[in-house]
């Protein structure tokens, strides 16, 4: 593990310590590591990069509005190659929170996420994206079957 020192003026250090406390970090190092990871992820997921990712998109909608339910489901079926699963949570008699888990090329995942959040009737949308390194490995089983096995690992 490498160590480095940074200098902050008192006002910025105080604001950073407040952020650390609010977010529940146990120390400055953990917070700095997460900030660095986030910046590296942003750069690695530039639109020109063909990076794969796993992502969740969360949004709220009124399930009594059958047109929004139909739009949401139609879009998920249209992009079935990206959608792994979805979780539907009832918040009250009208509102539902849905979480969709996706995997695929980052550009396609981001595009689909934005389309989903932008649907009429969808509220409080948010996306969390984790870039992945794709490793292809030869696979050989003892019973003679061979093929290719894919490992998807977070980049940072």
Image (cartoon, rainbow, N blue to C red):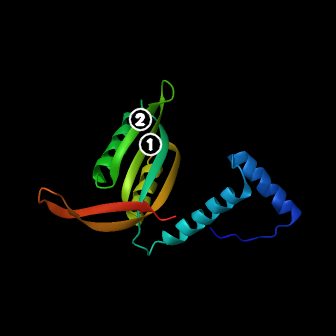
Q: Secondary structure at mark 1?
A: strand
Q: Is residue 43 above or below residue 104?
A: below
Examine the image and state in which quarter residue 149 appears: bottom left
Whether residue 111 is visible: no
> Please, which residue is most extreme toward the right here?
10
Q: Secondary structure at mark 2?
A: strand
Examine the image and state in which quarter residue 153 appears: bottom left
> Disc 1, disc 2: CB below 8 Å?
no
Whether residue 129 is visible: yes
**Measured from the top left, where is residue 38 in percent x and y?**
58, 63
Q: Which residue is mark 1?
A: 99
**Measured from the top left, where is residue 59 in percent x and y?**
49, 43
Q: Nearer the viewer, residue 40 or 82?
A: 40
Q: What residue is rendered at 62% in x and 66% in y?
A: 36
Q: What residue is rendered at 37% in x and 38% in y?
A: 69
> Please, which residue is most extreme toward the top here?
93
**Measured from the top left, where is residue 76 in percent x and y?**
33, 48
Q: Is residue 144 above or below residue 123?
A: below
Direction from residue 133 to residue 33 in the image, left or right: right
Q: What residue is rendered at 51% in x and 25% in y?
A: 92
Q: Which residue is mark 2?
A: 88
């Amino acid at each position: 593990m490498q160590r480095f020192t940074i200098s902050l003026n008192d006002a910025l250090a105080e604001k950073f310590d407040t952020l650390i406390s609010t977010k529940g970090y146990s120390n400055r190092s953990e917070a700095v590591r997460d900030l660095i990871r986030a910046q590296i992820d942003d750069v690695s997921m530039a639109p020109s990069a063909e990076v794969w990712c796993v992502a969740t998109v969360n949004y709220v909608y009124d399930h009594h509005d059958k047109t929004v339910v139909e739009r949401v489901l139609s879009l998920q079926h249209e992009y079935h190659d990206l959608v792994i699963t979805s979780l539907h949570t009832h918040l009250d008699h009208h509102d539902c929170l849905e979480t969709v888990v996706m995997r695929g090329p980052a550009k396609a995942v981001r595009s689909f996420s934005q389309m989903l959040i932008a649907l009429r009737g969808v509220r409080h949308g948010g996306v969390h994206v984790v870039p992945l390194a794709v490793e292809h490995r030869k696979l050989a089983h003892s019973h003679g079957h061979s093929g290719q096995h894919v490992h998807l690992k977070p980049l940072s």
